[in-house]
Image: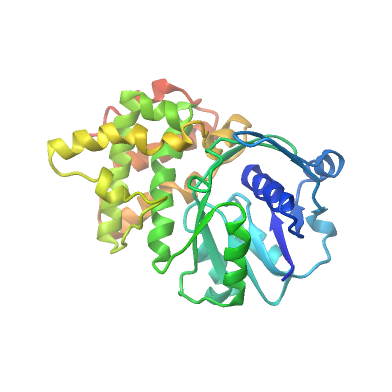
Amino acid sequence: MKYAIYGAGSLGLVASAILKKNNEEFDLVDRNIKSVNAIKENGIKIVGTLNLVQKVNVILDTNCNEKYDIIFMFTKQIDNLNTINKLKGLLKEDGVICTMQNGLPELDLASVIGEKRAYGAAVGFGATRLDYGVSELTSENTKESMTFSVGNLSGYHDEHFEEIKRILSIIGNVTAEENFIGARYVKLLINSAFSGMSTVCGATFGEVSKNKKSRRIIQSIIKECIEVAKASKIKIEPIQGKDVVKLLDYNGKLKKWLSFMIIPLAIKKHALLKASMLQDIQKGLPCEIDSINKVVSDMGKKCNVATPYNDKVVEIVKKMEAKQLKPDFNNVLLFSDIK
């Protein structure tokens, strides 16, 4: 099957470099001419926990005349419907798209190409784009840390799904999820808590987990996410072998204390990760807050579960986008009015 990776951002670069190193043939397609030209000239450079320079076949999307069986979608969820409609034109008649995005992007994807052609993967590792064609892998470079939970909302699996699993297994461990919404939701929970506070505080996952004030807010965000899932009848799946609900949910004081102590250990493999939302804010760009914490807030409204901590993250990040606030650890004080 002929496939493409769409999006030469932090994760798209890491995936492309590893696949090419393993002699995979594919096209890397991107919409930014500066990015395309840099990769053509210098190849992809990966630093951090993986050091790799790799030449790949890169194409500007407006110059792409190919038709693909599978497109792996590594873009941000900003203007997502327009991007999906553009990619639809690059698919073969029975071609599929596998979104690698945060949140619950399969809903938009299925609305354009149909549920059976809309696959998704919850990505269990992180990276930071440093420059055009240059990405820093910030998670541990191990199969245990480089994970994917794959599936689709309808539960439909065909030969495209088998090929998606084969390709992603070259990069890391792949779990085919029967309860795909539960696998998606656990990544949404993690992003809401750790990416949300990484952006609010202008810090790495490890730094916001170590600081006790930001960690208490992380704990409250996680609790809200779990309560919304319960009310929505979503069974949250484990991630990287860890049952987040069992480890971090609480009712009594002892379990609350234990979950508070566990948080830095739970995120240890990804302690160096800086939220992609924070990277966007620091570049003066709009970020994916509407696809992360706001999803939890909106779900909470539908099932009548209060989400004041997620709501506050959304409020703060929106002010950052409007240049009214900057990422800073002092922003934890803005949560003090939550009862």
Identify the residue at image location x=45%, y=48%: 292
Residue sitting nearer the eye, 213 or 250: 250
Determine which quarter of the picture holds residue 116.
bottom right
> Where, quadrant-wise, is the C terminus in this rendering?
top left
Compared with 30, 268 (above or below) is: above
Asked if residue 95 is positioned above or below residue 236 in the image, the reply reads below
The residue nearer to you, when weighing 167 against 92, is 167
Residue 264 locus on image (x, y percent): 36, 32
- Name the foreground residue: 233 vs 301: 233
Q: Position of residue 153 (x, y in %)?
A: 46, 70
Quarter occupied by residue 251: top left
Left or right: residue 161 compared with residue 227: right
Can residue 319 be seen in the rendering of this structure? yes
Residue in the picture at 27% in, 45% down:
247
Q: Position of residue 139 (x, y in %)?
A: 53, 38
Is residue 306 visible in the rendered image? The answer is: no
